[in-house]
Image (cartoon, coloured by chain):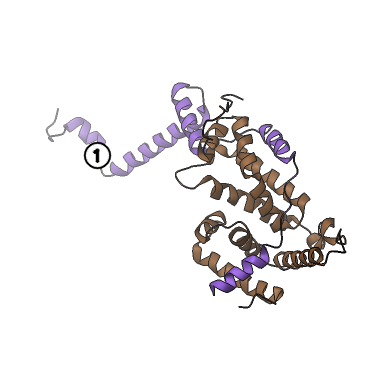
Amino acid sequence: MHGDTFIIPGAPPDTDAALMEKAAAGDARAFRQLVDRHLPRAHAVAYRMLGSAAEAEDAVQEAFCRIWTHAASFQPERAAFFTWAYRIVANACLDAVRRRSPASEAVEDMADTLPDPAPGTDLAAMAAQQSRRVRQAVQALPPNQRLAVVLCYFEGMTNPEAALAMDMNLKALEGLLGRARKVLRERLGDGVQG
Amino acid sequence: MMENEDKLKIRLASWQAPPPHGDLAERIARRAAALPQRRPWVSRAVDGAQRALTEWRYAFAYKLAVLTLCAAAGLAAGLQQGQDLDVVALAFEGPQGGSL
């Protein structure tokens, strides 16, 4: 390791590109800053893609290891860090989906299958049920459609950003989103008509 | 259309993702830092070429192979060009056709 980052209190934070440049030179502290900055969103993408916190942790760990080992390949003039990084996260999730056996497809987190912790409160029970329905509807989508929905609707990416992150053209992404919307509306039914 | 899109977004937002474990960032950083970093192939190729120019023994087999290929290509081109050339006549008569 060399060229470790020292954080000066009050100084503006380094940009992602600057941190990547340092990480590419072997600076583990700069890389740690990047992990801290992007882990919550990357984990949320992986969780919604895979439907399990344990699998999501494995996928983001795999993705960030790839980011570290391939740090020198990052070209800030060609893509923003977050689109490059989310492409790696998305690929790690799709790899995890492909590696799954068909029997493990339906495995869910225990937290979702346990009874509601406060059965007395109707509102909490309704919210939990609503959340379960959304989760089941999203999880039932084919992996590419699910990824498009996760990036655009849950993570708030624009369509061109999501297309870049998924390494596909805009038309193809819009096609995936259109099909996913139709299926989600059918499955979620009330309140969301096409 | 936009209203339906917004309704769908609101509906989807009811599914919250849990935050990652507190020590996950630490575990990731530790595991990643233990892995070797790969350099892009262009940078590796440039380094290799520079070393090949400065160290005569480096990539000697490749250098020999390239030299042999160049020699073979030169010979083949020379033979192709000189098929109709009477080398003996050229040597004894000179380029202007006069005898020596």
Letter of the chain in purple: B
Residue A142 in view (yes/no)? no
Left or right? Give the position of A44 relative to A23.
right
Residue type at mark 1 is Asp
Q: Is residue A169 above or below residue B59?
A: below
Residue B77: quarter of image:
top left
Pointer 1 indicates a residue of which chain? B
Residue drawn at x 60%, y 58% as measured from the top left: A151
Q: How crowded is mark 1: few (under 14 residues within 10 Å), some or many (20 or more)?
A: few
Tell me which residue sits at (65%, 42%) in the image: A64
Q: Which chain is brown?
A: A
Q: Where is residue A66 in the image (x, y as percent from the top left)?
A: 63, 42
Q: Is mark 1 on a helix, strand or loop?
A: loop
Q: Is residue A12 visible?
A: yes
Q: Which of A131 and A95 is in front in this view?
A: A131
Residue at 16% x, 34% y is B95
- Relative image position of residue A147 (x, y in whole percent): 63, 60
Residue highlighted by disc 1: B86
Quarter of the image with the N terminus of chain A is: top right
Residue at image coords 70%, 63% = B14
Corner quadrant of residue A191? bottom right
| B58 versus B43 height, above or below | above
